[in-house]
Image (cartoon, helix red, strand yellow):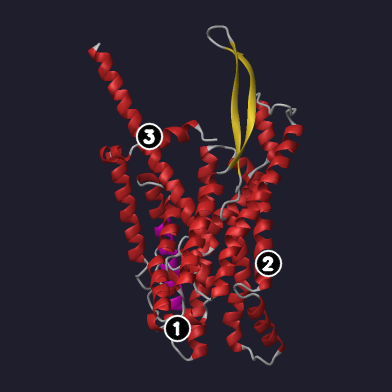
Amino acid sequence: MASRADNIASTLSLANFSKATELKNRIWFTIGALIVFRFLSFVPLPGVNPLILQSLYSKTQGGILDLFNTFSGGSLERMSLIALGVMPYITASIVVQLAASLHPALMALKKEGEAGRKKLNQYTRYGAVFLCALQGYFLAVSLEAYGASTGMQAVVDPGIMFRVGAVISLVGGTMFLLWLGEQITSRGIGNGVSLIIMAGIVAQMPKFASNLGQAYSAGDTGSVLIITLIVLVVALILMICFMERAQRRLLIQYPKRATQRGMMQADRSHLPLKMNTAGVIPPIFASSLLLLPLTITQFAGKSLSPESTMGKVVVSLNQYLGHGKPLYMLLYAAGIIFFSFFYTAVVFNPDETAENLKKNGGFIPGIRPGKNTSTYLDYVLTRVTVIGAAYLTIVCCLPEYFLSLTGLPLLFMGGTSLLIVVNVTVDTITQIQSHLLAHQYGDLIKKAKLKGRIR
C-alpha cells in the first residue's frame, strides 16, 4: 500500500524543476564534486611506475583488489592518490556500529542523541585514519616486494621514504574524499559517501561496454548472449527496486486521548520493517572474506614451489575458490545468509523497540506490551529476514553464476555493485522529490497568503 507521501510525490510535475533554484544549485554542486573525484582518480601516487602497475593489476585479477578497484572507480588499478577510496571509512563505520550495539559504554553514547552521534562519527573518522594508514603501508610494501620478485621495478625509489610518502598521500586522499562527501551531503543532494562509491562503479560502465563491443566484433560473444545479459540486468534492477521498497508494516495503536472538543480519539501508526534490513553489508562482508584467501595466495604464490606442500595448498585454493566454482558459490550464499541475520540482529533490537513502545503507551493489537511484544517483533523480523536473505542471495549469486558460465569479466554487473547503484539512485531521486515537494508547498503557501490579503 502506498503511503500518503508516495501519493503526493507521484503527482509532482517536473515542470516545477526549473523554478526550484536551490535544488538546481545543489545538483550542480554535486556534479562538480563528482567531477573533482574523477579527476583525482587519475593523479598517480608519487614514486610509482604506471606501466608496471598495469602488469601488476593484470596478474592479480580475481582477488579482493578487483572489488576495491570497482568501488574506487579504477583508482586502485592506476594507483592514484585516492586508490583506497572510502572503503576504510566504510569498514570503520561498520565496526563502530557493531561496537555501539554490543559495548555498553558505546551503547549508552548512542542513546545520547545528537551529541552521542557526533562522538561516534569522530570515532569512525579516527578508525578510518588508522585503517587507511595500515592499508597504505601494506600496499606500499606489496608494491616494493612485487618489483623485487618479478624483476620489474614498480617503485622508482623503494625505501622508507617511499613508504612514508605513500602512506601520507593515501591517508590525505581518503580524508579529502570524506570531506568531499560531507560537502555533498550538506550542500548537494543525496548522501555524499554513497554517491562517491556509486560514481566509482558507474565510471566502469564505458570500459565494460567497450570490452563487450570488442568481444562481439571479434566473434567471441554472440548477440543472444548480449540480449540475455541485458535482460538479466534489467530483471535484477527491477527486483532490487521492488524489494528495497518492500516493507512489513505492523499496526501500532495508542490509547484514546481527549481532544479539545471533548471527544475521545485513538491514534494509530505503523512500524515499518524493511525486507532487507541489512542493506548491502552482507554481500560486501561475504565477498571480502572469500576473496581474501585468493588475494593472499596470488601474492604469496609467486615465491612458492608448485611441488611443495604449501604450493599444492595454494593451487587447490585458487581452483576451488575461484569465481563461479561450486564451493565458492556455496560459501558465498552461506556468508550472505549468515551476515543478513547477524547484521539485522545488531541494527534492530526488539527488546529496545518494545520498551520504547511501552513507555509511549503504544501497543500492537492483540499483543501485550513488554516481553510479549518483543517476542512477537523478533518472530516477525526473523520471517522477514528470511525473505531478505533469499533475495540478496539470488541477486548476488545469479550474476556470479552467469559470469562463470559465459567467462565475461564483468565485475560491474555483480550483485553488490547493482545493489549499491540502484539503492543510491533511488535514495537520490527520493531526496529530489522531497525538495520539489517542499518547493510546491512553498508556492501553495504564497498563493494562500496572496488570496488572504486580497480578501
The answer to whether mark 1 and mark 2 are in CB contact below 8 A is: no
Q: Residue at x 74, y 30 (%)?
A: 370
Answer with left or right where residue 215 lies relative to residue 90: left
- Distance from label 1 to label 2 (Cα)? 30 Å
Answer with left or right where residue 304 lies relative to residue 420: right
Instruction: Please say whether residue 129 is visible from this viewpoint.
Output: no
- Distance from label 3 to label 2 (Cα)? 45 Å
Badge 1 element: helix
* Quadrant location, the N terminus: top right
Answer with left or right where residue 90 lies relative to residue 161: right
| Residue bearing mark 1 | 55
Residue furthest top in the image: 262
Instruction: Please say whether residue 64 is visible from this viewpoint.
Output: yes
* Quadrant location, the C terminus: top left
Q: Residues within 10 Å of mark 2 (few under 14, many from 20)?
A: some
First along the sequence among labels 3 and 1: 1
Is residue 160 within the magenta segment?
A: yes
| Residue bearing mark 3 | 437
Is residue 18 within the magenta segment?
A: no
Q: Residue at x 47, y 36 (%)?
A: 6
Residues drawn in magenta: 158-178
| Mark linked to residue 433 | none
Q: Residue at x 60, y 49 (%)?
A: 276
Q: Which one is in front in this view, the residue at disc 1 or the one at disc 2?
A: 2
The picture places residue 373, in percent across and down from the top left corner, at 73, 33
Residue furthest left in the image: 454
Q: Amino acid at mark 3?
A: Leu
First along the sequence among labels 1 and 2: 1
| Residue bearing mark 2 | 331
Could you say which is closer to the camera, residue 124 or residue 275?
275
Quarter of the image for residue 171 reads bottom left
